[in-house]
Image (cartoon, helix red, strand yellow):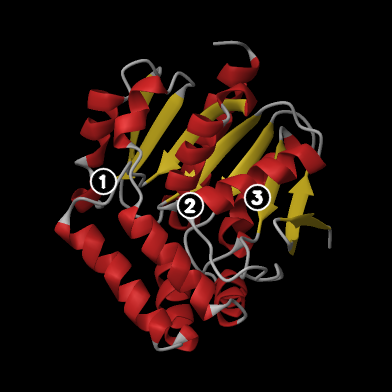
């Protein structure tokens, strides 16, 4: 398993394939195991998965993990792999990390894909989800969190086990720190400066985050944008609808490679 050092911690990553680098960014707690089905994209692209600090096989390092700190770890990984530009694919609040990276280092960003993404948490149900994660991790109930997230994100036993094992092995304080940072993170006022291509994916059943696409259209006025609605799924597009998700990401990546 490959490792590298970033911000005082030894972090675990995985990579497959060659071509345009696709950085897949997981939600709190779930780790790189989230993107089990995205490894298939390695036949056309370079797929890169990183366990955030305190997640999975990555060391905890310092006692906090914020959206900006995680973006810095990804930037350091891009440097480690000597990658000029990367396509950032963020799932749920992993999309906030992708946006933070793109806004901080636009020259290293080929584009951004979000699945159930949002520039800030400003709806009641989404806020309650973050607060539930904070309460669970405050209690140290990582087994409970493992059960909830693994069963809601996959119907395959092996994938569920990989996600659950990652969560059980993750640092409750750092997962809590990431939930807290995500709850209060906002890049809405910085979005007018975003110029890289932006692809927004939402599940048709994920109705309580559909509102956020309008914030992107209102504020990310310079970024070329598109929205894809994936039918028959809620928030868990990469894990429950991997074929559809992979097809959309692949098409977007090939457009970027072609300069379109």
Q: Quadrant of residue 198?
A: top left
| Residue 235 spot, x, y in % from top left | 34, 55
Residue 199's place in the image compared with 172, above or below, is above
**Is label 1 or label 2 in front?**
2
Give the alpha-carbon distance from disc 1 to disc 2, as whole Å. Answer: 27 Å
Name the element at disc 1. Answer: loop
Q: Which residue was labeled with disc 1?
A: 204
Residue drawn at point x = 62 percent, y = 64 percent: 33
User: In the picture, which quadrant includes the C terminus?
Assistant: top right
State the residue in front, 64 or 15. Answer: 64
Residue 213's place in the image compared with 232, above or below, is above
Query: In the image, 48: left or right of 160?
Result: right
Residues packed near mark 2 inside 10 Å, few (<14), some (14 to 19) or many (20 plus): many
CB atoms of marks 1 and 2 within 8 Å:
no
| Residue 190 spot, x, y in % from top left | 36, 30
Residue drawn at point x = 47 percent, y = 42 percent: 244
Q: Which residue was labeled with disc 3?
A: 73
| Residue 203 spot, x, y in % from top left | 31, 47
Name the element at disc 3. Answer: helix
Q: Which residue was labeled with disc 2?
A: 67
Q: Is residue 252 visible in the rendered structure shown here?
A: yes
């Amino acid at each position: 398993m490959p490792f590298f050092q970033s911000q005082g911690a030894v972090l675990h990553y995985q990579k497959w394939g060659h071509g345009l680098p696709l950085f897949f960014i997981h939600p709190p707690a779930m780790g790189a195991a989230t993107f089990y089905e995205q490894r298939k994209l390695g036949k056309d692209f370079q797929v890169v998965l990183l366990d955030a600090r305190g997640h999975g096989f990555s060391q905890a390092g310092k006692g906090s993990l914020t959206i900006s700190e995680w973006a810095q770890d990804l930037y350091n990984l891009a440097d480690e792999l000597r990658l000029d530009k990367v396509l950032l694919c963020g799932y749920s609040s992993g999309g906030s990390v992708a946006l933070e990276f793109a806004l901080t280092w636009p020259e290293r960003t080929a584009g951004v894909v979000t699945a159930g993404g949002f520039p800030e948490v400003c709806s009641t149900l989404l806020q309650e989800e973050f607060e539930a994660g904070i309460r669970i991790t405050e209690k140290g109930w990582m087994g409970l969190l493992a059960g909830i997230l693994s069963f809601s994100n996959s119907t395959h036993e092996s994938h569920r086990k990989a996600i659950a094992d990652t969560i059980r092995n993750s640092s409750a304080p750092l997962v809590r720190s990431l939930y807290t940072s995500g709850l209060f993170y906002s890049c809405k006022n910085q979005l007018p400066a975003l110029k890289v291509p932006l692809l927004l994916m939402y599940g048709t059943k994920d109705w309580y985050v559909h509102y956020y696409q309008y914030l992107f259209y209102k504020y990310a006025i310079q970024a070329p944008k598109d929205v894809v609605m994936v039918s028959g799924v809620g928030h868990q597009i990469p894990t429950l609808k991997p074929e559809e998700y992979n097809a959309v990401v692949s098409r977007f990546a090939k457009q970027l490679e072609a300069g379109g």
